Amino acid sequence: MGNLVEKGIVMKEEINDTTRYSPLPVEIFLQKAQSEWQSTYEGISDSLKKLETFEEKTDNRVITLKDNKTIISYCQALIKKAEQRIVISMWDEMYEALKEDLSQVADKVTVQGITLHVENPIKNLEAHRITPYTETRSTEHWFILSIDSKEMIYGPSLEERNVAFYTDDPVHIYLLEDYVWHDVLVNRLVRRSQDDLQQWITAERKSFFMGK
């Protein structure tokens, strides 16, 4: 009985050297239980949110995505999240799957990168020149989609393998964005092969990386 008194479930009264125990009124008991539950819930909720924030800050991930529809949905969600800049490298099949989503955000964020076998890509996107490499049937149709240099999805052609990779790891993102930039740069260099290029390369790189 003493434990129940300590837990506040039973009231203890002492009258004329006589101890009397009685239960808490139902309304008070329920209110007390609700208050304790709410306090416990809020404590757990705060702890989980802090843990989630800590993990987001410290635990950069590379996650495998499977299934064509799932991968496309992840890409569409990332495009909608973009605040400043989207970098892509895409062959025609992946570009067509995301063309509408990219077009919808092209007026509010900068969309940069390169496309392959795409006619009339949206503004700022480079159309890759035709080469023996692009026309070889065995060439993998990889894609890269990066937003704000914070999150990225990349992978092979979804027509060949239903797999892709999501990452928020800054090393992955830097390396693959740099890969896209070099692809863009070489494509432009071919068009300007007769010019003095060093000053032009410096200006183009600064423009591509938005002053970085």
Image: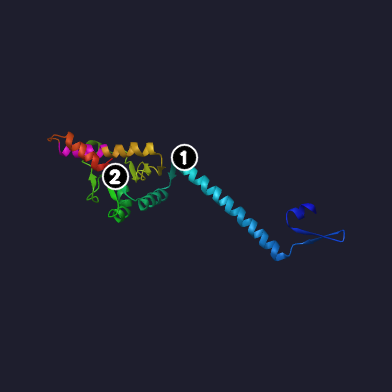
For the C terminus, give its image quadrant.
Answer: top left
Picture layout, residue 206 above or below residue 39 = above
Identify the residue shown where x is 77% and y is 59%: 11
Q: Is 139 placed left or right of 57 in the picture?
A: left
Q: Residue furthest front?
A: 16
Highlighted magenta segment, given as a residue range: 182-192
In this view, the residue farthest toward the left is 194
Where's residue 51, x and y in %? Answer: 52, 45
Left or right, 93 with reference to 199: right
Disc number for residue 73: none
Query: Can residue 138 be seen in this snapshot?
Result: no
The local secondary structure at tag 2 comes to strand
Label 1 SS: helix
- Relative to 1, is 109 on the left or the right? left
Magenta highlight: main SS: helix
The image quadrant where one finds the N terminus is: bottom right
Neighbourhood count class around disc 1 (C-alpha, 10 Å): few under 14, some 14–19, many 20 upward: few
Q: Amino acid at mark 2?
A: Trp
**How far across and how far down the image is residue 96, in percent?**
30, 51
Q: Which residue is mark 2?
A: 91
Q: Is residue 46 left or right of residue 70?
A: right
Residue corresponding to mark 1: 58
In the image, residue 18 above or below residue 195? below
The image position of residue 186, as x and y in percent, is 22, 36
Q: Are marks 1 and 2 in contact (CB under 8 Å)?
A: no
Residue 5 appearing in the image: yes
Q: CA distance from mark 1 to mark 2?
A: 33 Å
Q: In which quadrant of the rendered view does residue 12 lie? A: bottom right
